[in-house]
Every structure is written in structure tokens, then in C-alpha cells.
Amino acid sequence: MPERLIELKDIAKSYGRVFAVGGVNFHVDRGEVVGLIGDNGAGKSTLIKMLAGAIRPTSGDILVRGQLERNWDASRSRAAGIETVFQDRALCVQQSITRNIFMGRELRNPLGLLDVARERLEAERLMREIGFTSKVFTPDSVVGQLSGGERQGVALARAIYNKADLIVMDEPTTALSLTETAKVFRFVRTVREGGRSVLFIGHNIHHVFDIAERFVVMDRGRVALQATKSEIGTAGRLIEFMEKLAHPSGVSTEAGAAP
Amino acid sequence: MTMQLQSTETPAAPVKHPPDTALRQFLDSNRAALGTLAVFVVMISGFAIASPRVFLHWPIYSSVLVTLPVALCLVVPLVFVVTVGEIDLSFPATMGFSAWIFALVVQAGYSPFLGIAAALVTGTLLGLGVGALVVVADLSSLIATLGLNYMLRGFILICTQGKSIALSDLADSPAYNLLSSQLWGIPVQIFWAIGFVVLAGVLFNRHPFGARVKAVGDNPDSAGQMGINVRHTRIAAFAFMGLGAGLSGIFTTMINFTWWPTTGDGYLLPAIASVFVGGTPTWGGVGTITGGAIGALIVSFIQSGIVAAGLSGFYVQFFNGLIIILSLLGHRWNQKRYR
């Protein structure tokens, strides 16, 4: 059995009397790509913010490698090896790829100055690791020259550099073209081959179905479905399921009923 | 349902880039500074053709080298402030205030070195205060520093009742020999100023502080998400501006052996013009120290150059403006903008 990287048990988050997430069980194993799907307001964002330690759950337990975590917050989350690539990617477009990767945690030489040579070498290695093979760009290239998918790659490289075991990617393919999306998929696959896990959040079910091996469908703050790719079969069947969730006419799914 | 992808960003077109040689890289990363240098060379050549008698001889350069250090110590820190995404209009008063402290210490009979230290500390603290006010209260730096400039200058005028301080004993002091005399016919303060520019260049290009200044000016939200303390970085840029203002206040007082309550007043617009003539854009995130220094050189030469070229003083303002506009147009064409 693969190592359980992180597990959420009965996690709930409520704002006053409104449940954003109500009692969710959820886990990610080492080296797997999990797709998190759900409509707007399904609780995806709240869930990943709790993973990142940005917000505290109202109740429930968080376990990292089987150990119960107390005082879970952003720095604990990072220390546990979770890196979130937010939707806006947190890049500075006028700076070089290297500067973006090392933003806020610059490598220094004994004089306290930037260790430019080592940073450049590391950036080159990271670009290779995520399959950033273009000869057109060097670590000194300005991020503003890059396309959307390549920018996503820089954000990903930054997460890898931090030695993350789990990389959470929030809507990484939104506003990307087909070729760009393919590029992001290639990055994700390379990351997974390196033994890391990816939690891939997306609106486009086709995208998520392509890249992930296991799926978690959220609906109105609850998990409506957890299934592997082989259990689901085709993207069409997943979409069918989603449509039934949205319009439960005659079809009553247990999870569709909100409290 | 079929795949619905909105390609809002152009897919990577097969761009043909020239080979990535070391020379090309150097040219690319120093575009703005080299453009400014070109402007300077063209301008000086023009002056030399118009007035070879003046521009092919040393005295004009020597006289510019006396006043240039004062400008350099203002322009270079101002590049940091503009790059971090702010502006400082209060440095003339900070300069006057620091120089005042220097003059008071020297007048009281203490060592000028103590006066220098006091002026530098005063400048830095004032810059820190200006930065803290702008950043913590989240004010527009354009308006807030304008107000602070008036307030601080007003405070000086109220306290001194407009009286200047003469420091005639300064000429014999070791501090004067060290900072304001001549070496092989070259005004010695230019060496100090060049040292300051080099240190600032290292800070800007090779130190984490410079990297953070650029990141904050580029995208404060991203910088914050990556763990950079956005507020501290901004305040530090203002503090550095204060330090530079203190230094230039010391230089100008030593050159003139006199402190005036108006010390620093004339430097506001030339210093700002130098930053932008030098190729630092207005929008933050990028800047060039070398460019700023050459910009200061250009602005310093315009005035003496035009008069020496035989035109009347009435032309100075016109050519000042012309150089600024032409430089801006040049940089606009020379630099890519990514935001």
C-alpha cells in the first residue's frame, strides 16, 4: 500500500451557521495525482486553503504521514511539504525565471550577497526537471516573455525547489490554450515521476480527467464521489455524474442533499 | 460537451532568438544604461563640436565633477525608491536638515567627522520616518512626501529664522582634505561618489535587498505571497534615500563652507529627471543604477554645456526639457514593457 501523505478526517469549516465544508474525509498518497472537481461554491477553495494552513478548520483532524497535527498553520503546512501554486501564480513578470524561483528565499554566498552562479545552476536543473526544455529561454529570461503554461512551470519549479511532497495546483489550466495545457500536463507528469504528489483543482472535467488518477468530486461542502480512473471509466461518465449533481431531477444522490 | 479551452494567451509562437552569447547577454541586461550612455556621448559630441575650446579642455569637466557627487548621492537612492514603486519628493528638505545638523555640530566646535556621522544618522532616520508614514498609513507617496518636504523645510526656516551658518574653519580640517579637496587636479569627492554608486549597484544587483526591492515594485502581492516583507522593503528604500540625502547635504555644505536654510532646494527636479533620463521606468520593478548615474552626468552637463556652447542662458530650460523628452522616447523604444 502506498504511503499516505496527508489525510483529512471529518474536516469541517463553518462561517457562522453556514458550512463551507461539512465533514469531509480526504487523503492524498505519495506519488499520486488527485483531481479535485466541483462547481463554484462546492468548497474546493476552502479545502485547499485549509490544506495550506491559510484558514483553520472548525473541526476535524489533519494527519501528515499518519501523525496527527496540532496547531496547523501556513508554516506547519510548508514544513510538512505542502506547496500551493495559487491561481495567480504569484510571479513577478519583469524579473527573470531565476529571480522568481528564489523570490523571498535567495541563495547567499558567505558575503551575504546573492549566489548568482548557484541560483542559476539550480534554476537550470529545475527547468530540466519539469521538462522545460525550450532552448529559447534561459534562467535569465524575463517571465513576461513566457506563455501562460510556461509561467505555470516557473511557479511549479519554485514549489519543487522547496522540496514539496504535495503540490497543490489551483486551476492551473484556466485561461490556457490547448498547447499550453498540454505543457502544464507534461510538467505535472514529470513531477509525479519524481515521486511527488499533485492535487489538481480544475473546472474543466476533461482536463482533470486527463491528468489525474483518482478523483474527488465535491458538492455543496461535501464529498459526493471518490473514485479511481478505472472505476469511472470515461470522462463522459464523470460529466454525467456532475450533471446529475447539478440537476438532481428524479435522481437522488445521497451526497446531493445539503443540510 | 467538447473541449472548451479559452486561449486568452497567445500560444508560444516559434520565436527565433539570436544566439545567446556573453556579449548579447551583457547588452540585453544593460539596455537602459547603454542607451543613456549613448545619449550622453551624442550630447557631449554636440557640445564639443559647438564649442571645442571649452569641451576639449579639462576645466569644464573639473567643475562638473565638483557638483556631480551631490547629484549622484541623490539620484542613486532615488532609483531604489522608484523601483520599489514609490516616489520621494521630500529628499531636498532631508538633505537640508541633515546638512543643518552637520553645520551645527561643526559650529559647536566638534570634529567634522562627528558632524558627518550625525548628518548620516539624521538623514537615515528622517528617511525611515518618511517611509514609515507613507507605508504604514498607506498614503500616496507622491503627495505625502511633497507635504513632508514643505513641512520639514518650513521647520528649518522657523528654527533658523532664515539665517545661514558659515563654516570657514572647515577648510583646514582633515575631514575636508579627505572629502572635498583635490587629488591630481581631480575633485576628491567624485571618488567617494563613485564608491557610493558602486556600493549601491552591488546592493541593487547582487544583494537580496535589491532583488526584493524589484520584486515588491513589480508585484507586491506576489512578493508578499512568497514571504517578502513588503512594508519593510518599502520603508528601507526610503531610509536609503534619507542616507543619500544626508551624504549629499554634507558634500554641498563642504563645497560652499556654508550651510543655507535653502540647502537642497534646487536638486528636486534635476535628481528626478536624472533617474528617468537614466532609463529607470516609472512603473516600478525594474531600474538601473548605472543608467541613473549617467543620467545625473547628462543633467549636470546640460547647463554648463549650453552656456559654454555660446547660447544664452535662456536656452537652458528648453534644452533641459528636450533632453528629458528625447531620452524618454528613446527608452520607450529601447525597452520592452511587461506590465
Image: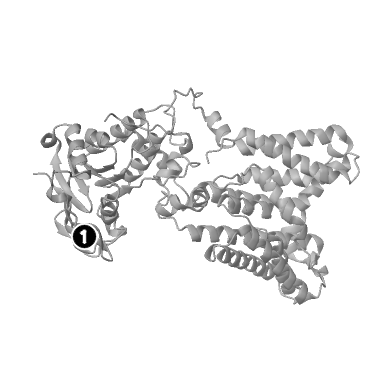
As drawn, B212 above or below B111: above
Is residue B133 toward the left or the right of residue B305 in the image? left
Q: Chain of mark 1?
A: A
Residue at the spot x=62%, y=67% of the render? B126
Q: Looking at this view, is A83 or A174 the one in front?
A: A174
Q: How is the image coloured?
A: one colour
| Residue lying at 73% horizontally and 65% vertically, measured from the top left | B96
Residue A111 % position (x, y)? 47, 52
| Crowd rating for badge 1 (residues with CA inside 10 Å; few <14, some 14–19, many 20+) | many
Who is closer to the viewer here, B220 or A138? Answer: B220
Left or right: where does residue B111 sit relative to residue A38? Answer: right
Q: Quick check: can you spot residue A142?
A: no
- The answer to whether any part of residue B203 appears in the image is yes
- Residue A188: percent from left, percent from top: 27, 36
Query: Which residue is the site of mark 1?
Result: A12
Residue placed farthest to the front in the image?
A250
The amino acid type of the residue labelled 1 equals Ala
Tell me how many marks there are. 1
Q: Residue at x 41, y 26 (%)?
A: A135
Q: Quadrant of the N terminus of chain B?
A: top left
Q: Is residue B305 above or below residue A235?
A: below
Of B51 and A251, the residue lying toward us: A251
Q: Position of residue A70 (x, y in %)?
A: 21, 64
Give SS at disc 1.
strand
Image location (x, y in percent) of residue A30: 17, 44
